[in-house]
Amino acid sequence: MSFSPDRYTNKLVVPIGIIFVLIIAGVAMTVNSQNLLKKQESAVAPYFSTVKKYTKDIRIPRIEVLGPKGEPVDISDEQRGRLMVLNVWATWCAPCVRELGELERMSRARRLQGVKVIAVSIDLPKNLEKVLNFIQKYNVADVAGYHDYKGGLQSLLPVKNLPVTFIVAPNGAILYEITGDARWSHPGIIEFLSFLDNLY
């Protein structure tokens, strides 16, 4: 006597098989993405002074700063679901000033059109005129036209040394914290940011 599965069993086998294959494929893709990410991180590490990778889900809080048009804006609203490079600088920080041009050039890279670059000055409000003069002098208003006029950024983010840059996922999670100035327009860094933009 032979066993013959009924028609209901046959109807279940195919969907279960498809679900199983999709789960295996998803796991394989995740493992592959993580391996590629580690490779990219190793390749880009020499271009930065110090890199801290965030392993816990820590989000950028809502922070109000003055925007490029002199109006209050929320940094998370400026991000609008995109990968963001958030730089913190000051006019009295020589490495910060050197870095501004690099950030501006990096923001114009064709491969990074989906990435939002914001450089926020933490100069005291009384020095706002000096900040504006720096922005004009170095022609970096597109990225550096932001000012932490309330001091909220400094109190809500771990800003200890300048310059410091946070790479933030589209969902607002901080991925990396980079301390020290960097050649942001270097092809290796652009390659890394482009990879992150595609990954997230």
Image (cartoon, rainbow, N blue to C red):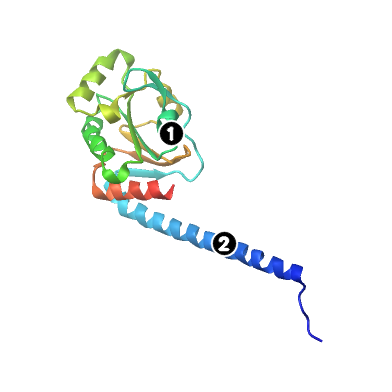
Location of residue 159 in the rendering, given as x and y in whole percent from the top left corner: 38, 30
For label 2, the crowd category at 10 Å Cα-Cα, with few meaning under 14, some 14 to 19 and many 20 or more, is few
Q: Specify the quadrant of the image occupied by residue 142.
A: top left
- Residue sitting at x 32%, y 19%: 69
Label 2 sits on what residue type?
Leu
Cα distance between the residues tagged 2 and 1: 31 Å
Q: Residue furthest left?
A: 137
Label 1 sits on what residue type?
Arg
Location of residue 194 in the rendering, given as x and y in whole percent from the top left corner: 34, 48
Where is 36 relative to 85, above or below?
below
Please give the residue where the numbered disc 1 appears in the rendered image.
80
Disc number placed over residue 22 in the picture, else none: 2
| Residue in the foreground of this view, choosing between 107 and 179 | 107
Mark closer to the chain start, 2 or 1: 2
Q: Specify the quadrant of the image occupied by residue 54.
A: top left
Location of residue 12 in the rendering, given as x and y in whole percent from the top left corner: 70, 66
